[in-house]
Amino acid sequence: MTELFSLPPEAAEPHLSVARRSFERLKDVPGLAPRYAGHRGPLTLDDVAALPPLMKDDLNVALAHLEPQAEHGATWLFQSGGSTGAPKIGYAPTGFYMTGVHAHWQPLDRADVFVNAWGAGRMWGAHFLAAALADLSGCQVIAVGSVAKEEYADWLAFFAAREVTAIGGTPSVLRLWFAQARAAGLKLPALRKVLWLGEPWQPQLAEDIAVVAPDARRWGMFGSTETWVVGTNTPKCPADTFHPLPEQLVHVGPDELLDFTTLNPEMLNPVLRYRTGDAGRLVACPCGRPGRAMRVLGRRDSVVQVRGLGLHVDELIARVEREACISRAQVLITEQQGRTSGVDVLLLTDRGASVDAERLRKELLSETFTLSTAFQHDPDSFRVREVDDLISNERTGKTSNLVLREES
C-alpha cells in the first residue's frame, strides 16, 4: 500500500501528527462525523489510506463549521468553486505557504523583471500567491491582472522596453498574451521564464512562445485553493509531471484518482485525503531528480453526461485543436430542465484564418460515439462555430474546456 504514496513511511509518518489534527477537526464537524466512525487518527500510511476520501462539498461543509483563522497575520478568503462553479470559501494565511515552496523551487531570482498576469481580486488566489513568491525572490514585479483586447500591444511594447525576463499566469491567459504578440509580430527577446498554475499546460502555447520568446522555458506549479501548491516542475520535467513538496503527501487511489494530505502544521484547510478530481501516477521523472514524482493524467470529472452517455470533453477538445488554424476550442453544453438540449464546440481561430466548421461538425459526429448516438434524431442540436472570444470566468480569468449553461 505504501508504494502508492509520494513519500516513504520513514519520511511521512513522523509528520502525521498534522493529519491526526485534521482528523480530529473533521470528525467534530456534525455533517461529517459519521463517515469517520470506526477510524482512528492516522499513525501510519496504511491508516491514511483507510480513511474515507474528502470531496470538495465535504471540505466546504467542514470549513463552514470550522471557520479557521491564521495564527499570525491576516486570514485571506478565496473562492474555491473552480472555473464553472459558484464561489465557495477557502482560507489561507498571509504568505500563502510560499515559504515552503520557495525553499524547494526558485524559478525567479533578484535579477528578474516579473509580470504577474494572474487576475487579482475577485477572491482569486493565484495572483497573490505569485506575488508572495516574487517577494521571497526579491525580483522586480509588474502586476497587470486583466487586460482588455485593445491594450495588449501597448503592454507588450512596455514589457519589451523594460526587458521583462519572466511572466506568469494560467495557460489560457498566457495564450492570449503570446498569441497577441505573435499575431502583431512583437518579440520579447529578454524573456526567459514562463510560470504557470491553474490549468494544464497547452502545446499551442509552447508554439507561440517559441516564436515570441525563443529562449523562454516553462516552470509549473500544481495545486488548488484547497490544497494550495502541491508540487512544482522545471524545464527539465515533462509538463504533466510535478515533484510534490515534502509538506504534501500524495496518494494514488482507485481509478488512479489522486488525493492529498497536508503535513504542514500551518495549513488552515483540514486537507486529509482530499480529492481534486485529478487522476495520476507516481513515476520517476526524466529530469533525474530522486524521489517519486506525480504525473497528472487529467481530470476524471472531464467526462460529462450528455443524454445518458459519457462525453470525454478533454479528448474532444484535443481532437479539435489538432485542426490547422484552430488555436483554442471550448465545449458549451446547454441544458433545459436537467436535460442536454444542445452541444456547441466553440472555435477560436488564428488571426485571418478560417475553418470549415460544417466539415468539422460532420467529422466529429461520425467519429464520436457519444455525439452520434445522443444527437441521432436531432443532429442540428450539435453545432461547431467560430467565435471572437471563448467564454471565460470573470472571477478567475480562466477559460475552461467545458461550460455548462442552463436555459429556462
Image: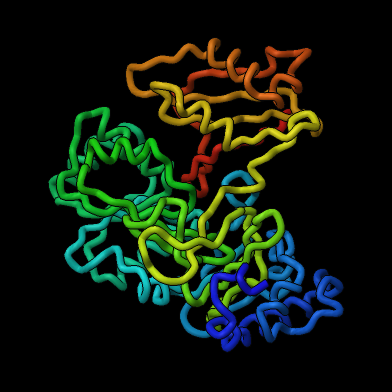
With respect to residue 179, does 124 lie above or below? below
In this rendered view, identify the residue nearer to me: 266 or 36.
36
Q: Residue at x 51, y 14 (%)?
A: 357
Residue 88, given in percent of the width and then of the height, sits at: 64, 58
Q: Residue at x 31, y 68 (%)?
A: 106
On-image quarter of the N terminus: bottom right
With respect to residue 397, does 88 lie above or below? below
With respect to residue 212, does 254 lie above or below? below
Q: Residue at x 71, y 19 (%)?
A: 372
Residue 35 visible to an observer of this rendering: yes
In this rendered view, identify the residue nearer to me: 184 or 102.
102
On-image quarter of the C terminus: top right
Q: Residue at x 22, y 63 (%)?
A: 140
Numbered circles on residues, count? 0
Residue 307, given in percent of the width and then of the height, sits at: 78, 29
In this rendered view, identify the residue nearer to me: 374 or 243.
243
Whether residue 343 sits left or right of residue 52 in the image: it is: left
With respect to residue 354, does 72 lie above or below? below
Whether residue 104 sits left or right of residue 114 in the image: it is: right
Residue 296, given in percent of the width and then of the height, sits at: 53, 54
Residue 190, given in percent of the width and then of the height, sits at: 16, 49
